């Protein structure tokens, strides 16, 4: 878990001296470092392990700079897992936290947070259909111009999907004529 920032925790991390470099840039300078921190909160068992990861490449999430002469930001973690390396645990946590924007996109764009009935199987089927629609939309977006690929589902639907169109029948064939969409050109 990530820890709440308190002055005693920040002080413990700032005082840490044994930083292990786990990643370097092209010039050989450290970009990510991990250190075990001697810190326990009141009421914690001694089984808890606290470590910090500082990085020069962190792009998202809550971060702070503790070192004026270094351009690192830092994250704090606590775990009872003593078997794995601290860097592997921090990496695993970041991967798990990376799913949050995807879930928010699914809730906002496809309403996966809304339950339509009290029947579990019906809700499961609706959920799976929404996930399928999301995946199909994302596959279609990957074939579109670069700026659109980073958009959230609500904007993709507004600009690319919910456009005026006419359904025409000509020469025995049905044809869907869409209004011009300059963003896709």
Image (cartoon, rainbow, N blue to C red):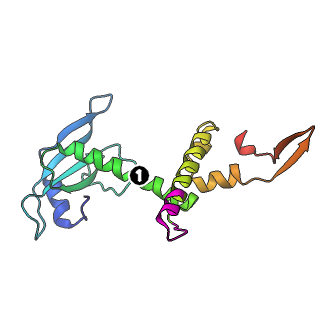
Viewer-nearest residue: 128 or 87:
128
Image height check: is 43 above or below 135? below
Q: In which quarter of the image is the N terminus?
A: bottom left
Q: Position of residue 185 (x, y in %)?
A: 73, 38
Q: Which residue lies furthest to the right in this view?
A: 171
Which residue is pictured at 26% across the width and 47% down the height?
Answer: 90
Q: Position of residue 163 (x, y in %)?
A: 75, 53
Viewer-nearest residue: 14 or 173:
173
Q: Residue furthest left?
A: 46
Residue 47 drawn in magenta: no
Which residue is pictured at 35% across the width and 58% down the height?
Answer: 62
Identify the residue under disc 1.
Answer: 99
124 with respect to 148 (left or right): left
Dot 1: what SS? loop
Viewer-nearest residue: 117 or 53:
117
Numbered label tally? 1
Which residue is pictured at 26% across the width and 35% down the height?
Answer: 23
Span of residues in magenta: 114-125
74 with respect to 100 (left or right): left
Q: From this viewpoint, is residue 70 visible? A: no
89 with respect to 162 (left or right): left
Image height check: is 1 above or below 177? below
Viewer-nearest residue: 147 or 89:
89
At label 1, counting other C-alpha atoms closer than 10 Å, the crowd grade (few under 14, some 14-19, many 20 or more) is few
Q: Position of residue 103 (x, y in %)?
A: 46, 56
Q: From this viewpoint, is residue 119 visible? A: yes
Q: Position of residue 58 (x, y in %)?
A: 35, 47
Q: Quadrant of residue 6?
A: bottom left
Residue 115 drawn in magenta: yes
């Amino acid at each position: 878990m990530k820890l709440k920032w308190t002055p005693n925790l920040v002080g413990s991390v700032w005082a840490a001296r044994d930083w292990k470099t786990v990643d370097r840039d092209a010039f050989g300078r450290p970009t990510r470092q991990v250190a075990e921190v001697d810190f326990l909160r009141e009421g914690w068992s001694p089984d808890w392990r606290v470590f910090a990861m500082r990085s020069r490449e962190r792009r998202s999430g809550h971060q702070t700079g503790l070192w004026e002469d270094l351009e690192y930001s830092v994250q704090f973690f606590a775990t009872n897992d003593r078997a794995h390396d601290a860097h592997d645990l921090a990496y695993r946590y970041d991967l798990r936290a990376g799913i949050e924007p995807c879930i928010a996109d699914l809730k906002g764009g496809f309403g996966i947070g809304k339950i339509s009935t009290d029947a579990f199987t019906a809700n499961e089927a609706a959920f799976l259909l929404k996930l399928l629609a999301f995946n199909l939309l994302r596959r279609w977006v990957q074939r579109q111009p670069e700026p659109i690929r980073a958009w959230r589902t609500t904007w993709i639907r507004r600009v690319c999907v919910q456009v005026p169109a006419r359904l025409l029948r000509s020469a025995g064939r049905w044809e869907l004529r869409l209004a011009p969409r300059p963003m896709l050109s």
